[in-house]
């Protein structure tokens, strides 16, 4: 090692001690990365396990680069989550590094931060990948930032590759950033979850990168799987055994409903837990994170919204209620545990419903070519169209539409501008073969996750082999290597409580109060607020399709492959329980219904008709008739977004004369009965029709709510 390199290493060790304590020493690959960045000004891809110290590499490199006589501008860290940004800013301060962040939560500070950057007062700037495609940031801030960047860091770099389990189109905008960097600007990309295919893809996008790939073993983790027969058994097991899990930890679920239900049940059994989902308010999520960091709660029951960026070194356990769709995603999530403790427990409690949930999320993938071409045609205008304005024109839900637009933007087919999107006119090819290969890779990952649960061999070895870790060997710690630590038995009391809890039927159907935007552009003269005299009241359903309790039973009745037939007795009994609770509960209906109306169904007419008949008989109410569908059936299944759904439903039902006559003489609300509420617009449109035909009020009642 040359004299200059020896001096640089001594400086690097000194910075690390400021960052991590007097006893900290650089790992060999940490030094190789720092040396390549600071001395050789190279591009580096670090594929290293969680807890290895990737952030130490870029903080030490930043400190050294900023101290050099030829120091350039700040280090720019592209980071996926605000939680990670908050942790990084605090970590940087310990090493004397001045870090700031630009994100959607601090818009009022942007000018101040930009001035500090120009004055040389910022060592590290953290930005989200979404910022890279914000028109104002992309056009005014990004070019100047790229020209003065001293080091670019791409955190969670597997997001760059659409072969990865967590591909994010905004990350692809980094290609433009990389292209605008001055020559010999060092670049560091880091990830803990990349197999060989993803590693090669990311390295190719970086260009001439030094790849430092280490072992992915996690010596502190003890992996296990418990096969339990039902959701009630899984909840009961947690209630019985949570005290045997060390410290505090995370319980991951596959759906928002499961996270909320699990947290509610565990609290009822005396456990201090909180739920964490992407649907919660940001302030509530931050408070829940802090409670876990401070060990004020035993567990955070979370969806994958609590993923990259959450750092609690002493996290004692991770339990999964349901399996993620790939071993790579699973490895990333369990990697939250055991970073600074000798021992952490990792348990998977798979469920039979996992595959159905995987299929649902897979259905949100990149749309078929005809839908993409329709969007491109709609955007060939003189003025930009917002996502909301596009919705009435294309049959895609908003999240899927936005993802598609971001991909098209990266591909150069559209451009995001102030006010929306415009087609560029550049030629674009729908890469069907690549999309098919990605879909096949996802299917293979799901099968690998099934095999992880049943493998007779070492579980850590299995995960490491899925990530192409050449050094994978038996861990000696998991339930296959060392024998099970936990038994599958649950107490009768906990199981009975879980069965009672999950067996409670009843969820609210919130009424719609506003029409989707842009309907007038497609010939539907509806806009603004739905008049109160045409609205439905709050309704009820037995459960959600994603519920731990009723979800599986309801999917068997109203799922896409369900056969039509009369409503089963147990489900009819649950409907009666819902009606009783609705009448006498904390939020009762304003007036008792005086009649029953069925929504005419093309897909499940026997189910809906028998449900309406059973309700009328039990409630001793007149069955007034059904609202009749008319006109062409249209494409099967629910349409993509609210605007499309309203467009399809406009004038799609008729009230027969005998039903209209009956409605006109009522002095109370009618129960409007259907099988499934997906978007909620069928109930809204049919309720509007009934109200305009004389119904004083409409109370929606369904077997299931989607989601």
Image (cartoon, rainbow, N blue to C red):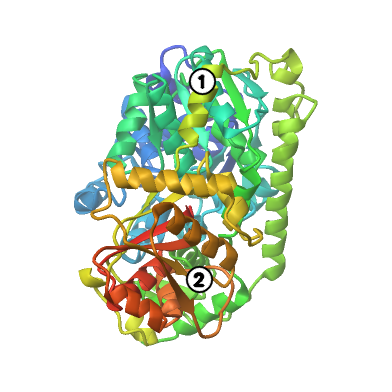
632 on left or right of 264: right
Instruction: Answer with the quarter of the image where residue 207 lies.
Output: bottom right
Up-down: is 244 above or below 495?
above
Visible residue check, residue 164: no
Q: Nearer the viewer, residue 316 or 422?
A: 316
Up-down: is 284 above or below 668?
above
At 59% from the left and 45% from the top, the residue drawn is: 552
Residue at the disc numbered 2: 639
For the residues marked 1 and 2, what is the alpha-carbon distance in whole angstroms?
42 Å
52 on left or right of 399: right
* Residues packed near mark 1 inside 10 Å, few (<14), some (14 to 19) or many (20 plus): some
- Give the x, y percent position of residue 34: 52, 33
Instruction: Answer with the quarter of the image where residue 360 lies.
Output: bottom right
Name of the residue lying farthest toward the right = 456
Q: Nearer the viewer, residue 46 or 185?
A: 46
Up-down: is 113 above or below 343?
below
At 34% from the left and 75% from the top, the residue drawn is: 662
Instruction: Answer with the quarter of the image where residue 524 lies.
Output: bottom left
472 on left or right of 24: right
Up-down: is 395 above or below 137?
below
Q: Nearer the viewer, residue 128 or 260?
A: 260
The numbered dot on residue 494 is 1
Between circles 1 and 2, the one closer to the viewer is: 1
Task: Tell me the quarter of the image containing the N terminus.
Answer: top right
- Give the x, y percent position of residue 84: 40, 37
């Amino acid at each position: 090692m040359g004299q200059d390199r020896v001096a640089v290493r001594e400086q690097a060790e000194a910075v690390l001690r400021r960052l991590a304590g007097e006893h900290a020493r650089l790992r060999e690959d940490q030094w190789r990365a720092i040396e390549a960045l600071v001395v050789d000004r190279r591009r580096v891809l670090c594929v290293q396990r969680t807890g290895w110290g990737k952030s130490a590499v870029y903080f030490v490199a930043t400190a050294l680069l900023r101290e050099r006589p030829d120091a350039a501008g700040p280090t720019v860290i592209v980071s996926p989550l605000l939680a990670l940004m908050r942790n990084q800013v605090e970590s940087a301060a310990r090493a004397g590094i001045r870090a700031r962040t630009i994100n959607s939560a601090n818009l009022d500070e942007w000018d101040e931060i930009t001035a500090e950057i120009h004055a040389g007062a910022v060592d590290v700037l953290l930005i989200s990948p979404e910022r890279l495609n914000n028109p104002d940031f992309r056009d005014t801030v990004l070019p100047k930032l790229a020209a003065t960047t001293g080091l670019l860091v791409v955190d969670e770099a597997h997001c760059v590759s659409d072969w990865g389990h967590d591909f994010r189109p905004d990350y692809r905008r980094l290609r433009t950033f990389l292209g605008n960097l001055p020559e010999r600007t060092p670049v560091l990309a880091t990830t803990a979850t990349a197999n060989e295919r993803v590693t090669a893809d990311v390295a190719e996008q970086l260009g001439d990168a030094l790849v430092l790939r280490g072992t992915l073993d996690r010596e502190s983790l003890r992996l296990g799987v418990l096969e339990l027969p039902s959701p009630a058994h899984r909840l009961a097991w947690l209630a019985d055994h949570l005290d045997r899990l060390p410290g505090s930890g995370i319980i991951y679920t596959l759906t928002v409903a499961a996270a909320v239900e699990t947290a509610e049940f565990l609290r009822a059994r005396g456990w201090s837990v909180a739920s964490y989902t992407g649907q919660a308010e940001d302030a509530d999520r931050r408070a829940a994170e802090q409670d876990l960091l401070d060990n004020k709660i035993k567990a955070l029951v979370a969806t994958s919204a609590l993923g990259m960026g959450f750092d609690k070194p002493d996290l004692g356990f991770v339990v999964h209620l349901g399996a993620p769709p790939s071993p790579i995603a699973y490895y990333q999530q369990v990697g939250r545990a055991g970073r600074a403790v000798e021992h952490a427990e990792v348990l998977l409690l798979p469920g039979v419903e996992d595959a159905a949930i995987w299929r649902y999320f897979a259905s949100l993938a990149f749309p078929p070519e005809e839908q993409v071409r329709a969007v491109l045609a709609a955007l060939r205008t003189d003025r930009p169209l917002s996502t909301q304005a596009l919705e009435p024109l294309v049959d895609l839900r908003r999240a899927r539409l936005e993802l598609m637009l971001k991909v098209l933007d990266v591909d150069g087919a559209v451009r995001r501008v102030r006010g929306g999107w415009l087609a560029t006119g550049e030629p674009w090819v729908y890469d069907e073969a690549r999309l098919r290969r990605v879909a096949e890779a996802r299917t293979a990952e799901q099968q690998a996750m099934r095999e992880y649960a049943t493998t007779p061999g070492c579980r850590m070895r299995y995960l490491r082999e899925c990530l192409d870790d050449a050094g994978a060997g038996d861990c000696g710690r998991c339930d296959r290597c060392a024998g099970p630590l936990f038994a599958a038995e649950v107490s009768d009391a906990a199981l009975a409580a879980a069965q009672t809890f999950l067996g409670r039927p009843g969820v609210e159907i919130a009424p719609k109060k506003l029409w989707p935007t842009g309907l007038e552009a497609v010939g539907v003269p509806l806009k603004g607020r739905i008049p109160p005299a045409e609205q439905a009241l709050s309704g009820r359903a037995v459960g959600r399709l994603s519920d731990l309790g009723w979800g599986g039973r309801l999917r068997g009745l109203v799922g896409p492959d369900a056969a039509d037939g009369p409503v089963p007795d147990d489900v009819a009994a649950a409907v009666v329980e819902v009606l009783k609770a609705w009448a006498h509960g904390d939020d009762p209906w304003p007036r008792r219904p005086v009649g029953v109306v069925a929504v005419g169904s093309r897909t499940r007419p026997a189910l809906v008709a028998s449900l309406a008949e059973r309700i009328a008989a039990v409630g001793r109410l007149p069955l007034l008739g059904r609202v009749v569908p008319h006109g062409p059936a249209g494409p099967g299944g629910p349409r993509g977004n609210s605007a499309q759904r309203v467009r399809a439903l406009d004038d799609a039902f008729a009230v027969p004369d005998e039903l209209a006559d009956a409605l006109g003489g009522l002095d109370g609300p009618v129960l409007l009965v259907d099988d499934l509420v997906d978007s909620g617009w069928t109930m809204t449109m049919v309720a509007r029709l009934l109200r305009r035909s004389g119904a004083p009020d409409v109370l929606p009642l369904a077997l299931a709510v989607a989601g």
